[in-house]
Amino acid sequence: MMLHYFLRRCFLIGFVFVALTILAFSLSYLFPGEVLTNISGLTDIKPEQRQSLIEYYALDQSLLQQYIAYLNRILDGEWGLSFSSQQPVLSEIVAVFPATIELASYALLLSFVLGIPLGLFAAVKADSFLGRLISGITLVAYSIPIFWWALLLIMLFSLTLAVLPTAGRISVLFDIPTTTGFMLPDIWLSDISYKSEATLDALRHLLLPAVVLATFPTTVMIRFTRDSMLAVLEQSYIKTARAKGLSRAQVLYHHGLRNALLPVIRQIGLQFSTLITLAMITEVIFSWPGIGQWLLDSIYQRNYPAIQGGLLVVSCLVIVVNMLTEILHTLFNPLARKA
Amino acid sequence: MIRALLSLMVPCGSVLILSACQPDIPETIQQGMVYCAEGSPESFNPQRVTSGTTIDAISQQLYDRLLDIDPATGELLPALATQWRLSQDGKTYWFTLRPDVQFHHTAFFSPSRALNATDVTFTFNRILQIDHPYHAIGGTNYPYFQSVDWGSLVKAVIAENNTTVRFELARPDSSFLSNLATDFASILSAEYAQSLMQLGTPELLDLRPIGTGPFFFKEYKKDQFIRYYRHPEYWRGKTELTQLVFDLVPDNAKRMAKLLTHECDVVAYPRNAELKLITERPDVEVQSQTSMNVGFWAFNTKKPPFDNVLVRKALAYAINKDAILDAVYFGYADKAKTLLPPTSWAFYHDLAEQQYDPVKAKELLAQAGYPQGFRMDIWAMPVQRLYNPNALKMAELMQADLAKIGVRASVVSFEWNSFRRKLSEYEHDSVLIGWAADNADPDNFFRPLLSCSAAESGSNRANWCDPNFDNLINQALLTADIKQRRSFYLTAQLYIDEQMPLVSIAHSKRFQAKSIKVTGVTINPYGGISMAAARKSL
């Protein structure tokens, strides 16, 4: 049963991937400028190179064959050159992508750690002052535009109190060799003598962007946990469990939480694309050298090969995460498997 | 559970925050300095660029030149060349090189010898000899040397022995030594070039630099930072700083914020509008220096009615420069009366200042046959430059001034690259633009801006070709006698004032803001920033 389900999902993901690559491929034609330039990223094509390039990119053949050649190149990791740097797009993406993943995962983690307990609390004590306060603050935080919120935090913690830095992943004076692209593991893997200082500095750089980026998912998490918990608490099996003599905590944990968190898991997947969009804004505000900033720069510079590659990677990530949460949801929820 | 979580988080958070107050960082990092620059470098070889941003980042930190310019007096000082002499006919120069000058030892190159004459000949022959193996590597552009026409001036660069280099010129040129002292004439390593050629990666010469300068190249992360370490064998003695990082922050407001949070020790180009705010801070010091630059309004002198000198003069009288200085430069500039800034030795101190006189302007227009005025375009450059921080605003002010004498001006602007292309095709009526000099020689203002050859190549924004003027600036170069040269340049300035192909508006000051902990960083009026003398107190 489960196998069948996984196969179906994999088939679906393959289909989505094909649709995405068709879109990315057609961008070479839809962007202004010459197709050969857009597809190869070479800004200065010499006449004697042209013919061999056309053959290499199969531009003299039918669109279908061009697309297949494109697909082959994508799978081979040959994504063309960036207009602005004339470096391979894929290597640039590999260099910036971990920073985004790092920021987004810390933010997501933060939103779990804060959001679920607070949401539960707000549901269990729905009528208390604290419960109302949490709901109220959540509503405000949900409505705050993220760039404004980020600027407020920068003004308070960086400019006025001067306790946290405004930009970057770590002080530029720390010379941390890149091995994985993720800052904290890189620090631990390096052979520098000042690991603890570097870690602390990296955490100080991480704090504001992570808080800013976590704000939206946390509020979503609180609201969803609260609503879903409230709905579950209304169910008759909760009353039955209480009537059977289980303690309040046991009921909450065994019967309430598990059932209440199911729709929350699904929400993560749905909110992930919003999270990535917000990560891009956060990256620009905090000069976080991730894919969001890189992609926005590419858009400004009309760097078509980079836009193409960046879109492909970001949308694949969103889809994969969506799929994973869906699968998780199904694993935890036997009802969904039948549907 | 929540209480437990909260009690965990509060101490963590406060540790993070408090730790900012008590740095426990190793010495190599405490003695590191962060310079926040306004943009990314295009190359790591000064021969290949003209942009001030790139020159600031690479030239003085990584390289040395044969000669240096004394920033205070503009005189030439010995650098890699300890002495030099000139032949009787003014066409041959000999330079004696300093002994024991070491190149950088880095992860990607280990030099086996000190600087010698082949490094100098390699550096310049790469530019001059079209069949040189390195000439076409990375393109054949050597913009500065092409703009001063070195191709036709320098016939040969020859190593006479290990320590003597001979330059043979086609004609005497008194600006030759000044050009050798510019940041663009940095000396490269011939040995490094050779080893790269053997490895089959010659293009790395311009990307992974080896020089003799105070710092060596460690790492460049595009659009993020450049990291330099101290060159331990620097011939002037090693620097106080152990590490120098150029943090690349194009956004003006972010650069300011990073100065205030001490993420940057030195900040390039604070915005004029914010200078007042930061001068009030006790932990920040603002430095200023009148730079060798000029912002001007050039007329397309081949296009009617601007071919009429009376019209050009009338327009010059109509402009209220004081208002422009206040509103566009916020008072942080000197009013210009000629192309040369007052710090130049050839500046014409007694030249009468151009007055703001709309009545006189109207009279002149009437004399020229335009009593009712006319329509014209003012092209305003779309980017911020030192010599003109806000061309659009300036154009709007001038629009109002011109309306008073009946001239109806429209402001025109394009994207920067097409703007420059259209300018060099002379599609404009008039343009607000400017010039920043690369060396102390006055020729560097006159020739690239107003000579006939500049009109042909498209850099003469006034499209002005006057044989009398060309004659003056050519004669000035043929003699090495400063007094004689000065008199030629004074006449040239007077002639520009009479002919008015352009209206000089302002010589902007260059600003730099730095933490008071940093000393030994000054703005060089003739070129890039140097960090060699910088030190940081804790």
Image: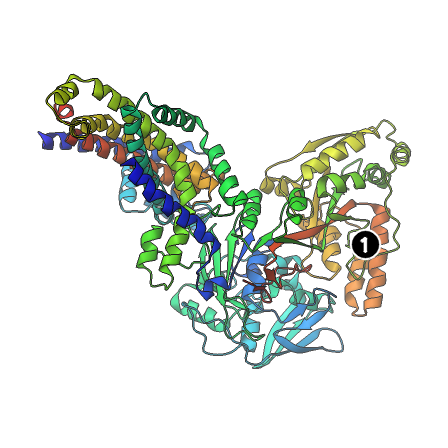
Question: Closest to the observer: A143 or B460?
Answer: A143
Q: Is residue B262 above or below residue B118?
A: above
Residue neighbourhood size for the residue with mark 1, other residues' Cα within 10 Å, grouped as few (<14), some (14–19), many (≥20): many
Whole-percent x and y of residue B408?
77, 28
> Looking at this rendering, what residue extends furthest in the bottom direction?
B161
Q: Quadrant of the N terminus of chain B?
A: top left
Question: Closest to the observer: B267 or B388?
Answer: B267
Task: Count the marks.
Answer: 1
Quarter of the image where one finds residue A131: top left
Residue B16 visible to the viewer: yes
Q: Quadrant of the C terminus of chain B?
A: bottom right
Which residue appears at 36% of the width and 40% of the height?
A: A309
- Left or right: A337 in relation to B335: left
Which residue appears at 70% of the width and 64% of the height?
A: B71
Q: Chain for mark 1?
A: B
- Left or right: B8 in relation to A251: right
Whole-percent x and y of residue A254?
15, 29
Question: Closest to the observer: A31 or B321?
Answer: B321
Whole-percent x and y of residue A276?
36, 35
- Left or right: B429 in relation to B284: right
Question: Coloured how?
Answer: rainbow
- What amino acid type should be assigned to the residue bearing mark 1? Phe
- Left or right: B207 in relation to B476: left
Question: Closest to the observer: B396 or B66?
Answer: B396
Whole-percent x and y of residue A322?
26, 32
Q: Is residue B173 above or below residue B114?
A: above
Residue bearing mark 1: B469
Residue A305 visible to the viewer: no
Kindly state the secondary structure of the residue where label 1 is placed: helix
